[in-house]
Amino acid sequence: MSPSFASFVLLALLQQPASDPSSLDGIRAYLKISDQLSTGGQIQYSEIPLLKEAGFEVVVNLAPARKERNGEEGYLVTEQGMTYIQIPVDWQTPSPRDLQLFYDVMKANRDRRVFVHCFANMRVSAFVYLYRTQVEETEEASALADLHKIWNPDSQEQWKKFIEAAKAAGR
């Protein structure tokens, strides 16, 4: 790395505002969808009390269980008095069955504040997009705009096909 590039990077980092450790914005890829629903990437154990303080009642995890990433998450969430639900969605083969289970969980908790996450908010944003358009009947453009704030599933063939199939099935 050249000295001028290193100086540029250091200067850019120094100009970044300090993040508020009590803010949910510190959660990777955090996105507030509505007063009832927010999404994000993998939460740190230290962020779990922040979810409780923010009024969330349910935490849904769509990532597979990984001891090093989320091994104690369920315990810590329930210790805070929130409900914890894990639906381990395989990145390579998301299934209609997982999507239906997600819909059922969301419908059962529609009167509660829900935070949904996975490792990078990519599985979640796709599932939430489908839920919003197919169950809540949210306007397509609005739900798609939120999805694209996180990523474009067309970049991953398995996710493009999964979304197309779910839309065709009209779940």
Image (cartoon, rainbow, N blue to C red):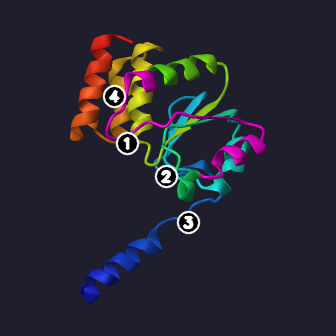
Closer to the N terminus: mark 4 or mark 3?
A: 3
Q: Are there few (<14), some (14-19), or many (20+) residues within 10 Å of tag 3?
A: few
Residue at the spot of label 2: 28
Task: Determine the residue positioned at 26% across, 35% down.
Answer: 158
Residue at the spot of label 3: 18
**Foreground residue among 9 and 93:** 93
* Range covered by the magenta-colored residues: 71-99
Closer to the N terminus: mark 1 or mark 3?
A: 3
Residue type pointed to by label 4: Leu
- Secondary element at tag 3: loop
Q: Are there few (<14), some (14-19), or many (20+) residues within 10 Å of tag 1?
A: some
Query: Which of the two marks, 1 or 3, is nearer to us in this view?
Result: 1
- Secondary element at tag 4: helix
Query: Which of the two marks, 2 or 4, is nearer to us in this view?
Result: 2
**Foreground residue among 58 and 92:** 92
Q: Residue 166 in the image: x percent, y percent?
A: 32, 19
Residue at the spot of label 4: 144
Task: Determine the residue positioned at 37% across, 42% down.
Answer: 150
Residue at the spot of label 1: 150
Residue 62 visible (yes or no): yes
Residue type pointed to by label 1: Ile
Q: Residue 104 in the image: x percent, y percent?
A: 54, 18
Left or right: where 40 falls relative to 49: left
Residue 8 falls in image quadrant: bottom left
Alpha carbon of mark 1 to alpha carbon of mark 3: how far? 22 Å
Left or right: where 101 falls relative to 78: left
Q: Quadrant of the N terminus?
A: bottom left
- Secondary element at tag 2: loop
Would you place residue 29 above or below residue 157 in this image? Answer: below
Alpha carbon of mark 4 to alpha carbon of mark 3: how far? 30 Å
